[in-house]
């Protein structure tokens, strides 16, 4: 009986106190015709030693290939202390800090997180996080509708560089509430928005810009934000948090700054782990805070006048407002935010900027090297951060298979997105010059 | 409060071991770069470790305290689940990596889907929803998609009992449905006449939790299912309380069409200070075409299993994607490890001992003079006591008891939920707690009530022994302080 402490004597005494003859009797309110005898599809129990062996065998099947894929999830060095502390039982096995006096550790950590992420994004306030970057776009779009109430179109315009999966997720989550998502015209040479082809007067409720873009380009965020504001739209920024150590913060985009910033928090100390659990960050201007979804932590005082932390503005949330809530979201990604806060504390701004610069330099070395191969060139002109799109003279899929056989994850197949044979590559600070050169050599060989 | 990490910060101090080799050259135009410097902490590695270790010590947690939070299933989270999910190959696996480098992970996910199908009696499982509330969203979206696909687009009403979690009505609203709330009868079961009155051609479905949030098993579930199905609606099962019935009765056998499970409750993945959760959904045959993607599929190639993703082309009527990749996959791995350690017999033991613990605690508290909200009923894995009399006679409220328990080193039960029971405590001990712990909890409860009744002790200012006293929530909401700005200190 794994993890059940009862001795036979305990069970006897407890049944006697209840006045029942058997545990089975405690289920006598369940109609007999609904009961099942046994589960058949769950295997027999295994002890920790046996399951550990199984999991190690499974893990070995996946191996540790050298990864040059980004496309929304990024391999970074995670200081050992991050998960050593985040998985302390006091963080790992606590729950939502509804009893504030017994949850000051979690609450102060979230307050510090909110401070750090607002500093990075250049905006005033942050929530305690959402599920992930993609679902954060859905929540941001719904928030824009609540905030920008004069606009009734429900039209959300997406820059061409917005991650296509983010759009799919936003449609799945927010589509039922009358929102429609449309793409702005693209300039084929740069991969960015085509300002010449922009159509005024569509009356969008929000314009979404991703920086760096999904295919790695850098958008003229100032100009696009000013255009969006002139059109009466709110500006929603999607930004990679590592990039914000170098790139202009969304709060300073254009004349007025973005109204809402969201993004995938995973690069801040969260392992790749096949796609989750990650966390979505969300920050916004002060005046929009009451339309923000999700938990928020505030600093206040206790009965003795000493400072302390508590969940606040809960009147926005589902457990109070029910159908009128800003979202049905209940949890934040508490443990991931704890890890991110420790990560940002350990790196500091200078450390994060070094990670960003080294990743940029590594990707530059990778791209320059690959572009010396016949049949490989840049897909788009212009600068990039730590990820760039390459145009190939042949199908990408077989090439990636050949590289995988050499234990290289060669990049993300961008063919569907770009509508031409294209590959998206990324080299973060985790790669050495030797790693990059080995990949270029393998790529050269695979290109024959 | 502890000093903030920002207040420990000193200009120029760093955790140097964490910095990569710097690269001074940046080929990005200046107008795209930031000119300001965000104020992240500047601290040494030891300072950071010490700061967050000390913060952790200000939390109550399952590892340190009894945590009988009703409807949250705060059971022991086995350490092995975490360690094995973080094996380097799993932790480092890129979500867009090829299936050739993911057969181990995908095998675990496929087997998890199969085990969850068996445990729930459903025909298909999708693991992608990232929390219970997102599982609900997936479920209601599938119900809507089902009706729409049949040209039955008028069905937009979702029926929700008054005892339901707030996420139920909020979810129905997000899916573009209207909510019809129905009352609960005096014995804790759904008011059947009230249900009859709201059923009709607009009924899309009903959302039920069974055992309910009142801690009792809905005895008329078969009749309810028949009535709703006859009216053309579907049944949604909120899996918040699945722990109570594992291996005893299955939602599929109760005729539910779609369910979500809270893997962070029933299958013991960490609550993490409020997430990540994981809200896998299960469907019966008629909703299989609408499952959220991706799902893990299995084919046999030359007698060898090959696991692969099923996506848009495989499930063309899917309600779509709910996350950037495939949900909280690392949480799913933890649930997989847990289920393999528990095994089929262990599943039944979980329900048995969770129920034994709840009924024992209920009997002891009843015998000690506490009033049960549903005295004629068995407890499922949780139960409710109400302090409505104590609140009037000696000014002892549910909030007071909650805060007084903290001073006695117990986490409080869920308070003021469900909303229909006044001054209530919803208590769920879980199967992993020992009889001694339960006895100590009963002693604390008796002590608190006795002091109030006999000695006139009030707890309005409790707790006294926590890192902070009772906090000013009104001030927190009125004078918003959501981030540290040294200039405004």
Image (cartoon, coloured by chain):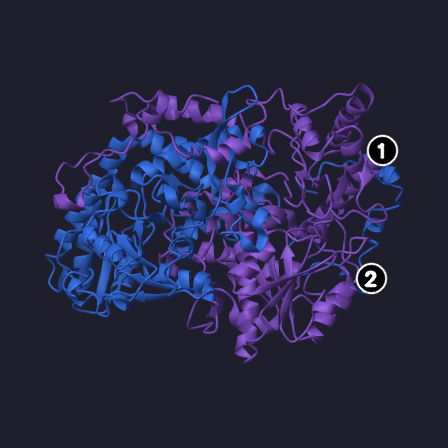
Chain colours: A blue, B purple
Q: Position of residue A442 (x, y in %)?
A: 20, 55
Q: Chain of mark 2?
A: A
Q: Secondary structure at mark 1?
A: loop
Q: Nearer the viewer, mark 2 or mark 1?
A: 1
Looking at the image, which residue is at 39% across and 37% down?
A: A340
Question: What quarter of the picture does the N terminus of chain A occupy?
Answer: top right
Asked whether residue B429 appears in the rendered view, the answer is yes
Looking at the image, which residue is at 54% across and 43% down?
A: B81
> Badge 1, how many Cα within 10 Å: few under 14, some, many 20+?
few
Left or right of A259: which side holds B132?
A: right
Residue that mark 1 sits on: B369
Residue furthest front in the image:
A150
Q: Against B208, is A112 above or below?
A: above
Q: Position of residue B22 (x, y in %)?
A: 19, 34
Q: Position of residue A387 (x, y in %)?
A: 23, 52
Left or right of B128: which side holds B24?
A: left
Residue B432 vs residue A401, the one in the foreground: B432
Residue that mark 2 sits on: A32
The quarter of the displayed image where residue A408 is located: bottom left
Left or right of A411: which side holds B479?
A: right
């Amino acid at each position: 009986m794994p993890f059940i402490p009862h001795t036979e004597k305990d069970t006897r005494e407890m049944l006697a106190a209840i006045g029942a003859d058997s545990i089975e009797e405690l289920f006598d309110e369940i109609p007999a015709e609904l009961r099942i005898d046994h589960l058949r599809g769950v295997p027999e129990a295994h002890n920790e030693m046996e399951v550990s062996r199984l999991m190690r065998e499974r893990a070995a099947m996946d191996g540790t290939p050298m990864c040059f894929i980004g496309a929304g999830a990024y391999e970074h060095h995670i200081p050992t202390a991050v998960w050593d502390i985040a998985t302390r039982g006091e963080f790992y096995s606590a729950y939502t800090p509804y009893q504030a006096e017994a949850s000051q550790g979690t609450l102060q950590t979230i307050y510090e997180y909110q401070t750090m992420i607002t500093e990075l994004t250049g905006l005033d306030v942050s929530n305690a996080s959402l599920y992930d970057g993609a679902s954060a776009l859905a929540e941001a779009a719904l928030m824009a509708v609540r905030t920008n109430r004069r606009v009734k179109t429900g039209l959300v315009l997406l820059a061409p560089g917005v991650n296509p999966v983010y759009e799919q997720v936003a449609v799945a989550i927010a589509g039922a509430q009358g929102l429609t998502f449309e793409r702005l015209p693209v300039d084929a040479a740069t991969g960015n928005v085509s300002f010449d082809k922009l159509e005024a007067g569509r009356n969008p409720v929000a314009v979404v810009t991703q920086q760096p873009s999904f295919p790695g380009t850098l958008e003229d965020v100032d100009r696009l934000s000013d255009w969006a504001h002139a059109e009466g739209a709110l500006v929603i920024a999607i930004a990679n948090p590592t990039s914000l150590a170098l790139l202009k913060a969304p709060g300073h985009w254009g004349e007025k700054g973005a109204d809402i910033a969201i993004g995938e928090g995973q690069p801040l100390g969260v392992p790749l782990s096949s796609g989750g659990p990650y966390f979505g960050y969300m920050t916004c201007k002060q005046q929009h805070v009451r339309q923000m979804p999700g938990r928020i932590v505030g600093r206040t005082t206790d009965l003795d006048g000493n400072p302390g932390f508590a969940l606040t503005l809960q009147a926005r949330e589902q457990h109070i407002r029910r159908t009128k809530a800003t979202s049905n979201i209940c949890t934040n990604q508490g443990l991931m935010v704890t890890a991110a806060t420790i990560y940002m504390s350990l790196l500091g701004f200078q450390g994060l900027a070094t990670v960003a610069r080294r990743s940029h330099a590594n990707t530059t070395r990778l791209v320059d090297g690959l572009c010396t191969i016949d049949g490989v060139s840049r897909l788009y002109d212009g600068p990039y951060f730590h990820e760039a799109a390459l145009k190939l003279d042949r199908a990408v899929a077989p090439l990636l298979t050949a590289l995988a056989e050499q234990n290289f994850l060669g990049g993300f197949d961008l063919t569907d997105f770009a509508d031409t044979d294209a590959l998206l590559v990324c080299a973060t600070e985790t790669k050495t010059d030797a790693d990059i050169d080995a990949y270029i050599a393998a790529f050269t060989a695979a290109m024959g | 409060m502890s000093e903030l990490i920002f207040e420990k910060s000193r200009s120029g101090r760093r955790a140097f071991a964490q910095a990569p080799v710097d690269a001074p050259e940046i080929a990005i135009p200046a107008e795209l770069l930031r000119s300001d410097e965000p104020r992240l902490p500047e601290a040494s590695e030891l300072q950071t470790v010490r700061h967050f270790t000390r913060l952790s010590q200000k939390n109550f947690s399952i590892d340190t305290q009894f945590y009988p939070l009703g409807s949250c299933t705060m059971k022991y989270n086995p350490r092995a689940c975490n360690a094995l999910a973080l094996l380097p190959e799993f932790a480092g696996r890129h979500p867009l990596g090829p299936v050739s480098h993911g057969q181990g992970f995908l095998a675990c996910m496929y087997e998890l889907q199969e085990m969850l199908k068996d445990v729930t009696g459903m025909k298909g499982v999708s693991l992608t929803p990232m929390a219970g509330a997102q599982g609900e969203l997936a479920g209601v979206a599938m119900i809507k998609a089902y009706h729409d696909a049949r040209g039955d687009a008028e069905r937009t009403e979702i029926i929700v009992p008054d005892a339901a979690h707030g996420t139920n009505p909020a979810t129905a609203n997000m899916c573009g449905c209207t909510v019809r709330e129905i009352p609960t009868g005096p014995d804790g079961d759904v008011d059947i006449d009230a249900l009859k009155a709201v059923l009709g051609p607009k009924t899309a479905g009903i959302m039920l939790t069974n055992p309910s949030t009142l801690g009792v098993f809905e005895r008329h579930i078969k009749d309810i299912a028949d009535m709703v199905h006859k009216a053309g609606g579907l049944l949604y099962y909120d899996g918040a309380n699945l722990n109570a019935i594992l291996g005893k009765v299955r939602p599929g056998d109760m005729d539910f069409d779609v369910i979500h499970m809270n893997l962070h409750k029933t299958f013991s993945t960490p609550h993490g200070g409020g997430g990540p959760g994981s809200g896998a959904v299960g469907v019966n045959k008629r909703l299989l075409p609408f499952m959220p993607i991706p799902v893990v599929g299995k084919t046999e190639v030359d007698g060898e299993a090959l696991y692969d993703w099923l996506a848009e082309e495989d499930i063309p009527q899917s309600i779509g994607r709910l996350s950037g990749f495939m949900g909280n996959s690392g949480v799913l791995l933890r649930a997989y490890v847990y289920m393999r350690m528990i095994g089929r017999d262990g599943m039944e033991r979980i329900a048995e001992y969770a129920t034994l613990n709840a009924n024992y605690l209920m009997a002891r508290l009843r015998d000690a003079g506490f009033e049960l909200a549903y005295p004629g009923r068995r407890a499922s894995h949780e139960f409710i006591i109400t302090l409505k009399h104590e609140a009037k006679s000696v000014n002892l409220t549910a909030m007071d008891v909650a805060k007084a328990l903290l001073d006695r080193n117990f986490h409080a039960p869920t308070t003021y939920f469900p909303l229909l029971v006044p001054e209530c405590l919803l208590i769920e001990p879980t199967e992993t707690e020992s009889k001694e712990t339960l006895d100590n909890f009963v002693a604390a409860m008796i002590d608190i009530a006795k002091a109030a009744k006999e000695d006139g002790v009030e707890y309005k200012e409790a707790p006294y022994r926590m890192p902070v006293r009772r906090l000013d929530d009104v001030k927190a909401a009125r004078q918003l302080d959501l981030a540290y700005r040294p200039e405004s200190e």
